[in-house]
Amino acid sequence: GEKSTCKECPIGKFGASLGLSACAPCPAGWYQDSLAQGLCKKCPIGKFSAEEGSDSCTECEAGTSNPVSEAVACSDCEAGEFSATGAATCVTCESGKYSPSPKSVKCTECNPGEHAVASGSSTCTSCLAGKYSGSSGSTSCAICKGGEFSAVGSSSCDTCAEGKASSPQSETCNSCTPGKYALTGASSCTDCRPGEFSAASESASC
């Protein structure tokens, strides 16, 4: 009859000693992609193997990461972070950008009228009344000048109408009182000169 011979351990398994009757599966977090091996290989950072007997490791999906070898799973990135496929670590969103939920694959720029001062933001903050941000990805809000005003979350400042005035960082313009007047975009109301008057409020002239 035929003589029995020893067989090679298949991929995903190993035989560590002499005289084995069977090969053992590589443990989870390890793999073996070659035949007849006495050891398994560690899954590298950014990859994992969830089950024993693996012949390869799987890359961490985008939005997750794994900083250690021999991993059996990857960890979700937190809100304010993101990652691409096969990441060892999640990347913090830079200021002016945000990611609102865990497992984000990118950070999004804040809209005009909003800002994110700190890196790692999960939300953007609306600009306060009297301030504005005119572009996407702002890290701060600018102050509206005297003669201008803005509501909360504004992407620009509006100009005070004639007969009204405002100081810097104002939410509204104030009406000029009788005896005063203002042209469009005034930062203060001007007194009528001697010999002139304005009987009504919000006058554009005397």
Image: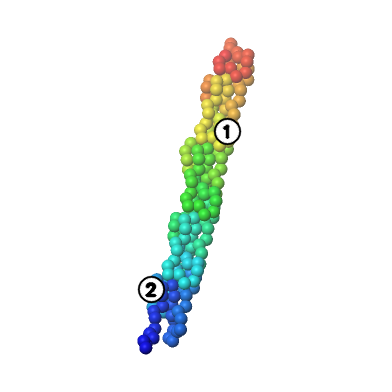
Name the mark on residue 151.
1
| Total numbered circles | 2
Determine which quarter of the picture holds residue 190: top right
Decide: is 113 above or below 53: above
Dot 2 lies on which element? loop
Q: Residues within 10 Å of mark 2 (few under 14, many from 20)?
A: some
Q: Residues within 10 Å of mark 1 (few under 14, many from 20)?
A: some
- Indicate the amino acid at tag 2: Ser
Furthest-top residue in this view:
195
Pick whichever of labels 1 and 2 is earlier in the sequence. Answer: 2
179 or 150: which is nearer to us? 150
Name the residue rendered at 57%, 20% in the picture. Answer: 163
Q: Position of residue 64 (x, y in %)?
A: 49, 58
Q: Position of residue 66 (x, y in %)?
A: 48, 63
| Numbered tag placed on residue 93 in the rendering | none
Residue at which label 2 appears: 34
Secondary element at tag 1: loop
Q: Nearer the viewer, residue 71 or 82?
A: 71
Nearest to viewer (mark 1 / mark 2)? 2
Task: Indicate the amino acid at tag 1.
Answer: Ala
Q: Cα distance, mark 1 to mark 2?
A: 67 Å
- Residue 40 x %, y %: 43, 74
In the rendered image, residue 104, in percent from the top left (x then y), is placed at 50, 52
Q: Nearer the viewer, residue 191 or 24?
A: 24
Q: Can the viewer see residue 199?
A: yes
